[in-house]
Image (cartoon, grey):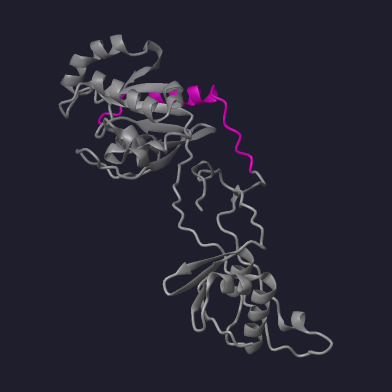
Amino acid sequence: ANVPPTQAAQDALVRLLAARGGKGGLGNVHFATSTHQTPRIAELGQPGEVFEIDLELKLLADVGLVGFPNAGKSTLLSIISAARPKIGHYPFTTLQPNLGVVALGDFSFVVADIPGLIEGAHRGVGLGFDFLRHVERTRLLIHLVDAAGVDGRDPLEDYNKINDELRLYQPELAKRPQIVALNKVDLPEAQANLARLRAALPEDSVFEISGATRSGVDALVQAMAERLASIPAPDRTPREEELSWPVPELDERVFSVEPEGNGWRVRGKRIERLISMTNFAQSEALMRIQRVLEASGISAALLSAGVQEGDPVYIEKAELVWSDQE
């Protein structure tokens, strides 16, 4: 059984039932009778469920910085917050998202520097899945574009490709409020591209900035704050809810007997649970197993199937040896 992917991502303080613990075994007092007051038998605890679970973190931030590698996202985050991400003049310097808190008077918000996206990110290219999932929970996107095209790419094509990747990954992201920051405008190559970029981009959501000279950054931060103030904040009230998935109800009386190797395999919810909780070092426990096999009809089913003296009988992880002797 696997945890449904729809339940893998949950807000903080929501309880997720990932595996059920085993039921405690019965002590020897439970087996006492008027004629057998000191039984030498006690059950083991029932084994709990064991799963291999992949946990994926989705960062919780108000603003997400997106763009191609080397567009200047980490530099911008280091300017507007106290975050100190690794910064280098080469693509893919950032391999993990970085968070920074931006304070503007009494108003503050969290900004996430999302590692650079490339074409095909929605299919997982360039660790695209690892990066794009962090964008999902942001309220506002700051789309950084290298206006100078210092890596030989066309800035307008970069802008369109990133938006395509967001849309292909999750159509709702294409509708997410977005501010475009044309970066590196201090370079002559950027100045040559500005008129063309301005003509093609939304007029009221474009800012010209320079991470090197910090020009235009204050105006961009002010625009972030104003835009966030107009976007309703999601309800993050802690929920006292336990999430789990349905477990099929099986008739405990149902069992099956089938050949396995040179012996026989017995399957059944009740008998398998009993075997897993049996301490085979106790002679009375072995006698109890024998009585259950008789009473449940398993012994009769094994005889009908053709079990012979000395045949191994496998139940759960235990191997028993069939004997015709009482």
Give the side of residue 267 with respect to residue 195, left or right: right
Q: Is residue 154 visible?
A: yes
In the rendered image, which quarter is residue 177 located in?
top left
Magenta stretch contains residue 280: no
Q: Residue furthest top?
A: 199
State the image coordinates of residue 310 (x, y, percent, origin top left).
Answer: 49, 84
177 is higher (above) or lower (below) than 71: above
Residue drawn 39% across the image and 22% down it: 179
Q: Is residue 228 left or right of residue 185?
A: right
Residue 254 placement (x, y as % from top left): 64, 61
Is residue 12 placed above or below 259 in the rendered structure?
above
226 relative position to 220: left or right: right
Q: Is residue 281 above or below residue 267?
A: below
The residue drawn where x is 15% and y is 26% is 152
Residue 43, given in percent of the width and then of the height, sits at 65, 78
Bounds of the magenta span? 212-238
> Which sits in the foreground, 223 or 106?
223
Asked if residue 218 shows in the view, the reply is no
Closer to the camera, 285 or 122? 285
The answer to which image quadrant residue 71 occupies is top left
Q: How many marks?
A: 0
Look at 45% across and 46% down and name the residue there: 57
On screen, residue 96 above or below 296: above
Identify the residue at image location x=67%, y=76%: 294
Quadrant showing the C terminus = bottom right
